[in-house]
Amino acid sequence: MVLFFRLSKRQLPNLLLCFSILVQFSCKKENVKVVYPAGSNEDINTWITDSLKRYYYWTDQLPAHADISKPPLVYFNTVKNTTDPFSYIILPSDPTSGIANSKSKFGFDYSTIVEQRTGLVIGVIKLVLNDSPASRNGLVRGDYINKINGKQLTRNNAKDLQSELLSGNSVTLSIARISSDQLIADRDVEISSGATFEQPATSKVIAAGNKKIGYLYINDFSPGLAASLYSVFAGFKSSGISDLILDLRYNSGGQVAEAAGLTAMIANGINYSTPFIIYQGNKNGGRRKESVGDAATYDGTVNFELALQYNLGLKQIYILGTGATASASEVMINNLKPYMQVTLVGEVTRGKDAASFKIFDMRVPKRVAWEMHPIVYKLFNAAGSGDYSGGINPDIPVNELATLPLLPLGSENDPLINTAITIIKGAHAQTVTLAAQTKKRTTGALTVLADSKLSASSSSVVVTHR
């Protein structure tokens, strides 16, 4: 039986309103967000996706559909942009989820090279941190390695042995010397992983003819770095230095605030409102600018007025860099350029022209324990210059590994330092290598097979704030 209803003109609008409400209610039910069990891959990956959509620089290029059932680490690496080698995610309670490096585990970094002239495959220790497991076991910069865990270094196994070293909690190194183009084993050193503390900067004043040159080696831009250098810059200022060599060859970065604080003590004409950095984010983050003062004081460790008291008023600086010079170190190089002549000595830098901040679950109670460090901004200096993802090219190319053994950091005969000193004194750069190579082994053409510092620098990004 079919029922027919006769509707008056007054009743028809009421019926249409009811129908509209029913349709809207139906649509809302279809858009209800699925709630997954806390701690499940689906729940964690949904949080990852939502966070990346809001903050990630390449948010518009995130895949429309991705398999959220994958383990979070796999999922994150699947959805991030293919041109992004720097964003990462970690589970703080699981050390294996991060990127291991020999400096943090054992307190040293090394390169494995092959000399083209002799065919020798040599592990060269480049950096040994103070009061580290490596230093306590007698390792020094310039030592040679010919075996790792009893296995001879070769062209074919250099990367595998580096991975084995980085993944272990102990390592046995065979330390060797070179005699008549042969590696001769001297001793075995067994090192267990252990704590390594913040490294103090290394500084000195070099007398070169009628010049007084300040030298400063900085290992990283960790919080409080700039404030720890007040006394160093006070000493430089009282000594009347005319030039500064800033050694960032192994500095893989850190805080923008520390780079800005250091800028306040170096460049001529700096004040609180001097433009320093431009952050370019996604459609949500937009574009924002920070002055030297705002950037330097953000983390609360820099007394800006005090920093200005130690300002050297320099119009030129010589910065030493390598492929391990990354992130905040590159900000230092690029962002000083609007205010002084910057001469980069060494090799092409790493090429991290992007910044990140830590993203974590702020809900109460917290549902996700993972932490993300995605690229959020591209970086530019006050003049709008940036775009150095391919690295910053040196003005004077010098490869420190071309002359062995490596000398202590700060040595005036170190090839990079010697080059800067020679230029400051007014000599032509071509004379530098002759001075630096006196009574030294010249490797000539070489190939780097593996480098623990370059591997570690992949996990560092410029650290900024929301």
Image (tube, helix red, strand yellow):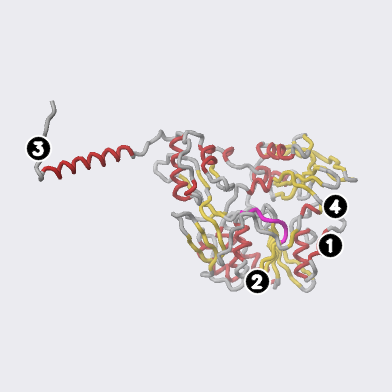
* Magenta highlight on residue 457: no
Q: Residue at x 37, y 36 (%)?
A: 34
Q: Quadrant of residue 318?
A: bottom right
Residue beneath disc 3 = 6
Can you tell which mark lies on residue 435?
Answer: 1
Q: Which mark is residue 314?
A: 2
Residue drawn at point x = 69 percent, y = 50 percent: 129
Category of crowding for the residue at label 3, using alpha-carbon neighbours closer than 10 angstroms: few (below 14), some (14–19), many (at least 20): few
Magenta-colored span = 345-351
Tag 4: residue type?
Arg
Sequence order check: which comes first, mark 3 or mark 4? 3
**Mark 1 touches mark 4? (CB < 8 Å):** no
Foreground residue, 120 or 264? Answer: 120
Which tag, 3 or 2, sits closer to the chain's start? 3
Residue at position x 66%, y 69% from top?
341
Q: Which quadrant of the structure image shows residue 172?
A: top right
Are the two marked residues, 3 and 2, in contact with CB atoms closer than 8 angstroms?
Answer: no
Query: Badge 2: how crowded within 10 Å, few (<14), some, or many (20+)?
Result: some
Is label 1 or label 3 in front?
3
- Label 2 to label 4: alpha-carbon separation: 36 Å
Establish if 187 lies above or below 292.
above
Quarter holding the N terminus? top left
Q: Mark 4 highlights which residue?
A: 441
Q: Label 1 sits on what residue type?
A: Ala
Image side of residue 313 versus residue 77, left or right: right
Location of residue 231 in the rendering, given as x and y in whole percent from the top left corner: 64, 65
Residue 285 place in picture, x, y as percent = 46, 56
Residue 429 image offset from top left, x and y in percent:
79, 65
User: Who comes first in sequence, dot 2 or dot 4?
Assistant: 2
